[in-house]
Image (tube, grey):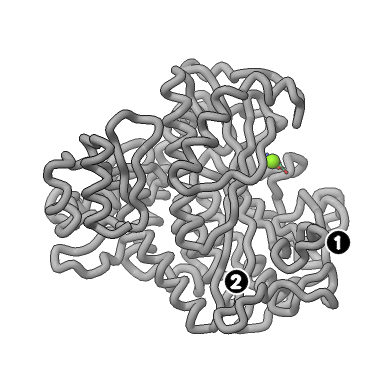
Amino acid sequence: MQRQQIIKTVRRRKVELVRFLYCGNDGVIRGKACHSRFLPSYLESGIGLTVAMQSFNMLDQLVPEGSFGPVGEIRLMPDPETFAVLPYVAKTARLLCEMVTLEGEPWGACTRTFLKRMIARARSAGVTLKAAFENEFTLATQDRVPLDRSPCFSSIGMDSAAPLMLEIIEALQAQGVYPEQYYAELGPGQQELPVRFADALHAADNQITLRDTARGVAWQHGLLASFAPKPFPDQAGNGSHVHFSLWGLKDGKNHFHDPKGRYGLSEAGYAFVGGVLAHLPALVALTAPTVNSYRRLQPRFWSSAYTAWGPDNREAAIRIPSKRRGLEMESTNLELKPCDPSNNPYLALGGLLAAGLDGLERKLDPGEPALVDPDTLTETERKRRGIRRLPATLAQALDALERDEVLRPALGDVLAKEYIAVKRSEVRGFEGKDVAFEIEHHFYKY
Ligand code: GLU
Ligand code: MG
């Protein structure tokens, strides 16, 4: 939306507060709001923010080994395209922001800018990524009692969550995010709401909208919508599997689609899979980035635990979903499972692009398909096929990210250093603490 239009809409809709939002290195959605009376000037200059916020972790601590402290400012500069009046809070609108320096230059620690950089890298290779996050989340009371114990995909579950889910669905559409399916998932109070795919930047923005909207609407009902990866230690986790495809800029075609390819996937598709699998132990530090994430990435929970790929294999890290008849090109995509909604979606999609593009450049071979749950193969067989266990802890994932010669440089020195410092501090913050402490913090903040 043009700036003038935003200002008009704000007046017409009697908006009082306009939130300038961003997603932190810790995956928490944060921001500041300005009063609508002063919006025109803040649209120009952005809202000031202490540099320290990019050294904050999800326990709300300023990380001692971070680069940023009490001295220094940046600006939250809104992208006017992201303007939306919030349907679930009275007289409030929001804009999604990038972090810029006082001189108006992109700031090295900004995650949305990182994704834009990776999108530009793809464009220079003649392609663009389209993606959608397939979110699962848990509805529960403030004391974390799940909304119901309905069976998987049951209409019992659909009925018990119906009024709330319909409100969430309507609120999303009012903000330009389009849910495509809905079902009550396996876990207690668990819902799944896949939305329509969009180009990578919009897909990441949509993820912020969806998380905020589900939580905001639930809050109006006195409930919590939690996107914690493992809200109950022994039950199904909350994934945000990424469905993605790569489209040609010139021909406007899906470059993953090849009717003659094995499972209908093109050579480019296989090379992209090769890249993602090669970097996966490091990539999960971006896509599944909390301490709680690693409680989810266990065998037999359909969230994946190994660097394997396979056609319609729901225990493989990358699934090639079967195509929809009559919509073969449009529906050709890959699904990355070791990804959850506690991540910063700009980092997750930027990292996915960097890994996949590396596969394309080096024409990496993803190896043999896994046609069974990789956990049922013997260790020797997995070794023969080059299937590795995903990191079992956030600390291990961060070690892999630190060593990764594609992902770390892609993030750039400033962002990589800060991200790793923030995440290492989260590892320490939960060391020696019990499961209850871990779940309490993740349940509430994601
Ligand atoms: N809840 C599973 C996860 O943690 C995914 C189940 C499914 O949709 O296949 O990723
Ligand atoms: Mg699901």
Nearest-to-viewer mark from 1 and 2? 2
**Mark 1 close to ligand 1, CB under 8 Å:** no
User: Where is residue 6 shown, x and y percent of the image?
Assistant: 26, 51
Q: Is residue 253 above or below residue 423?
A: below
Please tell me whether mark 1 sits on a helix, a strand or a loop: helix
Given residues 204 and 142, the one toward you in this image is 204
Q: Is residue 380 above or below residue 89?
A: below
User: Where is residue 153 shown, x and y percent of the image?
Assistant: 75, 31
Q: Is residue 372 above or below residue 428?
A: below
Q: Quadrant of the N terminus?
A: bottom left
**Mark 2 close to ligand 1, CB under 8 Å:** no
On screen, residue 103 versus residue 396, left or right, reads: left
Please tell me whether mark 2 sits on a helix, a strand or a loop: helix
Provide the residue designation for mark 2.
356
On screen, residue 214 versus residue 358, left or right, reads: left
User: Where is residue 400 shown, x and y percent of the image?
Assistant: 54, 61
Q: Which mark is residue 381?
A: 1
- Tell which circle, 1 or 2, labels the residue nearer the N-terminal end: 2
User: Where is residue 31 shown, x and y percent of the image?
Assistant: 28, 43
Mark 2 neighbour class, 10 Å CA radius: few under 14, some 14 to 19, many 20 or more: many
